[in-house]
Amino acid sequence: MDVMERALEFESRKMSGMTTSNRVEASREVKALILELNDIYKVDKDAGIMDVMKRLTLIKRKIEKRLNGNLTV
């Protein structure tokens, strides 16, 4: 399962000290991984895939939060 290996590798990457362009690239990459895993999950209904998607979504939210800044009023 190549997608799962790439997802686990992405999850173990160091996220501190990233430039803005690195964050944009990482956000796009993790979005693509989540969508690929979702297609697999639709067929298999494996709980492990769902857990990985949830963890990747949390990472994606953190990256995007840093990109967008504090927009709350």
Image: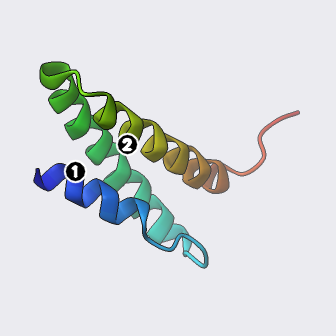
Residue 45 image position (x, y, % from top left): 22, 21
> Which residue is at 36% across, 51% downward?
30
Quadrant of the image occupied by residue 40: top left
Q: Earlier in the sequence, mark 1 or mark 2?
A: 1
**SS type, badge 2:** helix
Residue 53 image position (x, y, % from top left): 38, 38
> Which residue is at 82% across, 35% downward?
72
Residue 15 image position (x, y, % from top left): 54, 69
Quadrant of the image occupied by residue 71: top right
Reading the image, the residue beneath label 2 is 52
* Tag 1 near tag 2, CB within 8 Å: yes
Asked if residue 42 is positioned above or below residue 17 in the image, the reply reads above
Q: How is the image coloured?
A: rainbow
> Which residue is at 65% across, 56% downward?
66
Give the crowd class for mark 1: few <14, some 14-19, many >=20 residues within 10 Å: some
Nearer to the camera, 54 or 33: 54
